[in-house]
Image (cartoon, coloured by chain):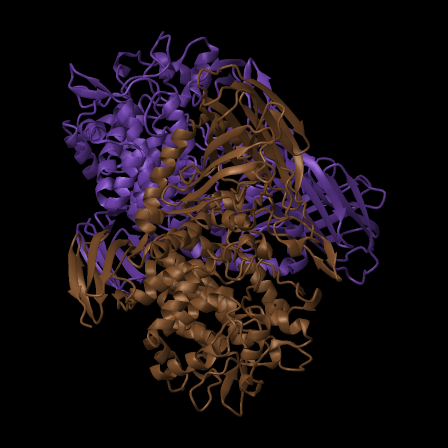
Chain colours: A brown, B purple
Amino acid sequence: MSDFRITYTGWNPPEQKLREALCTLGNGYVSTRGAAEERCADEHNYPGTYLAGGYNRAKTEISGNIVENEDLVNFPNWLFLSFRPEHGEWLNLDLFTVLDYTQTLDMQHGLLLRSFKVEDGDGRRTSIESRRLVSMEHMHMAAIEWRLTPENWSGQIELRSALDGTVVNGGVDRYSDLEKLHLDPVCTEAIDDESILLKVKCRQSDLAVSLAASTRITEAAGQTDVTRETHEREKYIDQLLRFSVEEGGSYHIEKIVAIYSSRDRACAESSLEARKAVSRTGGFRELLSMQEAAYRKLWHRADITSTAGERHQQLLRLHIFHVLQTVSPNTIGLDVGVPARGWHGEAYRGHIFWDELFIFPFLNLRFPEISRSLLMYRYYRLDEARFAAEEAGYKGAMYPWQSGSNGREETQVLHLNPESGRWNPDITHLQRHVNSAIAYNIWNYYQATEDQLFLSYFGAEMFCEIAAFWGSKVEYNEERDRYEIHSVVGPDEYHTAYPDAEEGGLNNNAYTNVMAAWVLQKALLILDMIEESRRNELLTERSINDEQLALWKEASKKMFIPINEEGIIEQFEGYEQLKEFPWEEYREKYNDIMRLDRILESEGDTPNNYKASKQADVLMLFYLFNDDELRDIFTTLGYSFSVEMITRNIAYYRKRTSHGSTLSRLVFSWVLLKHDKQQSWQDFETLLSSDFEDIQGGTTHEGIHLGAMAGSLDLIQRNYAGLEVCEDVLWLKPDIPVHIDELFMRVQYRRHWISITISSKSIRVSFEEGWSNTVNIGVIDRVHEFRHGEEKEFPISR
Amino acid sequence: MSDFRITYTGWNPPEQKLREALCTLGNGYVSTRGAAEERCADEHNYPGTYLAGGYNRAKTEISGNIVENEDLVNFPNWLFLSFRPEHGEWLNLDLFTVLDYTQTLDMQHGLLLRSFKVEDGDGRRTSIESRRLVSMEHMHMAAIEWRLTPENWSGQIELRSALDGTVVNGGVDRYSDLEKLHLDPVCTEAIDDESILLKVKCRQSDLAVSLAASTRITEAAGQTDVTRETHEREKYIDQLLRFSVEEGGSYHIEKIVAIYSSRDRACAESSLEARKAVSRTGGFRELLSMQEAAYRKLWHRADITSTAGERHQQLLRLHIFHVLQTVSPNTIGLDVGVPARGWHGEAYRGHIFWDELFIFPFLNLRFPEISRSLLMYRYYRLDEARFAAEEAGYKGAMYPWQSGSNGREETQVLHLNPESGRWNPDITHLQRHVNSAIAYNIWNYYQATEDQLFLSYFGAEMFCEIAAFWGSKVEYNEERDRYEIHSVVGPDEYHTAYPDAEEGGLNNNAYTNVMAAWVLQKALLILDMIEESRRNELLTERSINDEQLALWKEASKKMFIPINEEGIIEQFEGYEQLKEFPWEEYREKYNDIMRLDRILESEGDTPNNYKASKQADVLMLFYLFNDDELRDIFTTLGYSFSVEMITRNIAYYRKRTSHGSTLSRLVFSWVLLKHDKQQSWQDFETLLSSDFEDIQGGTTHEGIHLGAMAGSLDLIQRNYAGLEVCEDVLWLKPDIPVHIDELFMRVQYRRHWISITISSKSIRVSFEEGWSNTVNIGVIDRVHEFRHGEEKEFPISR
């Protein structure tokens, strides 16, 4: 199917970095444990950027700022394969004449296909059909296959198959002053005639990584006489294969590679396991058929089909695909989080932000076990968050904005503006709202799964610690009889301080305050839900006394939200006093003003002075909660709320946003659905193509924007299909745009699989299978009891 | 409470090894990750045997047998603390005069207390009160505290506080020819005035382990002038503290230690984390109060009280305590299994056998999350088991009898008989029944928890693969129209071959056959239970076709069981033809004939020639299944079954068993309850004290017998309280011995906590708390619906 494939034709060097980022292969495990990305370093001399969950001490002094603890490590290039005709040059698309080039990401089967024909300086034309995979089924394996044809020459050919650990972290230009080298050599070895081994060690984490590769010539048109030669040097081993080829012949070469680390489960020693895996695995064909089967399973669960056109469908699948390249059934239990840019590039050095917030809705209803594992990642860093809270003088746990490998705060203290070349102080670590995002994720994971064991142990503990943090962070304002939150930064990173203030931080960021109130309220509810003994344990162990609980209750009802008389929710207290920003002037002057912060800083100004947002964080509330929930929250807080308020706030902030974050489009498209369908659709289309077309101009090849990608799926699911879990019912309240005739998806709700088809005319729901005989599904406004195997269709009146 | 403490008074060197084994401290994590045992290496010059889940290549040739891949590593001695008076000798109980000695294991709080007074060669008397703990709350920490009093001298004193990585694996004499050295040095460092660091690396697994220790003199009766000196050598660092003491003064010294490994979650680098932990942790008192709280929680869930006397209660608690020293909430997710001897000694080198079978019943109903983690340990070794099956020509998965770190078979090929000094071939790896034990555990975990997510993914996959193995292992005997299983060894390791047979292995071991039939039948049931899509996935992925399923069904109904006309189930086909063993003669000759195999071998004979069992494996069936289940199994197989058959089989095998395994007592006590109460109680008492009194004479100090320990708890729970989960009801059908007036326990059943008090007169059941408002509990013969908070009492008519 063409909408399962993304194809690039023609060799286009300027675009190639972007293409490679979008064609990155992984399988979750490989991404976090070893070679994160399977780009085409081998075939085209592009630097391979292989990343991992290994951690390296990179002490580099930059303008007095010690950058320590890199959380990404560039990993050995493992599928390296190259060739040269006798006395010729090694394959190099920049030096050779490229006569033909097609690159296809086959998402349906998890393959990267390349077909190209090159001519070397001596006029020798060679064509190659290449297929590569990173196995989803056998998480330690990857493979590449070549079919090589000398088009107009005969003679000796040399193949080079390498395991190259000399790679560095070099994928992001502006990090070039940071320590790039993260691997120490351990050993190389020629295992047997066909196989080689490379073992390296991460410099900081002591993580040992072993790669074993076996290179075979499977069909060689009457050619059996192959000589092999192994070369070893520090952190590098290759095998040269020499044989003679004949004009027009077809030569099949395959390379099977295994990767293991010393942190792996069931691993006696990583090189032992890698050797074993390569020797036990069949050839490319076997791995290919396993790959097809594994992807068939994944797509059965994960696919979302929409009739809005081929490109639209392709991009939806691209987003699903990359979510599953980053986290997958293979990452369950691996103690890894979801970095903001997937494992697709080095931007943000693998740090974990709040992006799970956008990714969980998709995972919860399809792969809840992955969600659980991601939440456990946070749980295992709870002690570090407790320490951070204590250090800062708070109770409970304070999760960091940029979380490093061991859960420490890794937000940079200085930030480089490439526009001005200046390093500026950075206080974005004051984004305490990340804590509420984690709580929100716990709650919604539980809603989707009813996983009581998780909730009462790990979930409740994290939730209460986050609530305890908010409980100690709020300040009572007697005059207002309200609780306030001071000195924070909201999701909109353009605003970090008041104009001319000496200290950073803002007061009463509306998003932060509402979320904190929500957390406090839900924490009390969770304490009521879980077993008494567990509640008592938790309260005793964490020294949460009645006084504190009373404060939580009080603050959850009396949190201050800055709302003006027109019902505009101020982004933070004092936002209204800021100057309006001359948008037109700057749009004309700079064309692209998405990174307004950098532009202003280079002019000696700052967005802190203006009503100008990177993303409108007030609107996040309308994204996270539906109208009923919002009404509930606001009413509990004693503020009036009307749906009409939403419209007004959208209009207000739309005018004042630069969309400097990919997430901004998501939020606008979402909230506009009910208020301006056309604009909503337009924003959705921009969102869909934001990585594909690299709309930020050069950020995608540093890593995809996983939050935005997953957000687009969530938008279809929660916004268009109107799917949500509320009071033990799976609700469907669709509102699909006119551009889509029919939507189809399959979701897992509390161990039941439900398939859903929505058109403009009707909603078809089928209770395909599950663990109980009945399930309650709400359609539009009524709850229906579905029996196992039952399918019902409901007309939509427009 | 005295029944929470085990106290030894008087210094008794011959007994000390046993005492230390029984007083081992751990917390699950520390056991498997670092210093497994906290014995008194420091204080009394006993070699510390610290074990870990690190793995080391120990290539030692013994009679041609390469012993490779040690699965235990002796870990650094971390709580080492010693002293010497000026110009005196270092503390040494073997050289000093011991005037007073008391050692107490305080199980209630997880402490080891020691109080002793020594006199050195110069007549200087010093008394020490020592308390030590391995933190259950903060799994990376341990601590020791001394209160030292110079009774009759004043002057300078030197304290030595060390981290000693020069330890070797030396705990089991007969392994002395194996490689003992497993740690390579990395570094030592004096961190600051108070703290030192040791980092070592496991030679095979590349696991890096870091220990940081901080030694403080907290109260020193007017003494502040302490000089410190650090000494470092390879794999060793210590700190000497010198200060002057006065006669009668009281000096408080404490040492806080942290351990981290490179395999830990949320670990950037092990020494970094260890340093951090030591610097962040308060003193001994803080750790002590956390320890008390953590143990309060554990005992609330885990305690079983019985009125059969103080010793009885002590031993029950000792067993609970050691289960929780081996696996605990701290081991959840760590990819560790339960070794046969806990982590308490080096016997069996940490290999994983079938002991979970005896440990799961206790865990499932109290700490189901630990059970799940242990099952996942098996799941992560499923690929290795698949490979083993394939290599041996079978389908599915064949788990090893002795499972090494990566799931490979580690059963020795030669076995040393210390009686004869001969190395004999060992084919006990043919104990394929271990596969059925894993399946049984999966099923019973599910029964206790209703964990559907686990069952449909991990559980069903393992279960089906084990069923597929049996499906390919059975052989159809046309003459009998029965399926048979050939060439195996049952749990009774005395019988491994037919007399004078050239090949090892026996046919139709009754236990193996019944369990295989049960597995096949339950596999089909599970396939019916799980979601259709998951079933289809599984069948497709594992290539299980209709033909195979039909065979499973057929074989589950037509498995051959060797039963003679008197209803005696033959241990294996042909057992009846073996000679009777002259028990009296040997009992007179050898006094202790528990290890009859060794005796006979040293005489040039073998138990294979006799009706003589180490443990009666037929009786295992009566232990695992209740009468109704047994009737069901036998009837399905077309064999008649009567309860009276059980009595006959017990009588038959009792006469023919040497009780060479601690598990044998468990099984006999269990099955006799209904048939010979007095003998049953006697066996139970032997079982209870088997480690405490080291009834096998010298095996306990090589590691406790965890299966037997946990089995004694299961016996109280399932046999005396008659507690079982059957068709979604928690049943209680008590049958308590006259020696017990009242039994109390608390169990968790499908997220409900139920407390149970059973006396000879009544059964009191209280539905304390849970996730639903009602729960069905069957008492004796009727199902009662309990509402949340409800307590009911039922009289027992005798």
Residue at (43% x, 35% y) in the render: B381
The quarter of the rendered structure image containing the N terminus of chain A is top left
Image height of A579 relative to B145, above or below: below
Of all residues, the one furthest to the front in this rendering is A123
Q: Image check: A774 left or right of B702?
A: left
Q: How many marks?
A: 0
Q: Nearer the viewer, residue B619 or B407?
A: B407
Q: Nearer the viewer, residue B619 or B294?
A: B294
The quarter of the rendered structure image containing the C terminus of chain A is bottom left
Q: Nearer the viewer, residue A138 or A696?
A: A696
The quadrant where residue A757 appears: bottom left
Give the image location of residue B40, x and y in percent. Answer: 64, 41
Q: Can the viewer see residue A656 in this picture? A: yes
Give the image location of residue A231, x and y in percent. Answer: 64, 25
Give the image location of residue A280, x and y in percent. Answer: 45, 26
Image height of A120 relative to A417, above or below: above
Q: Image check: B3 left or right of B88?
A: left
Image height of B35 relative to A722, above or below: above
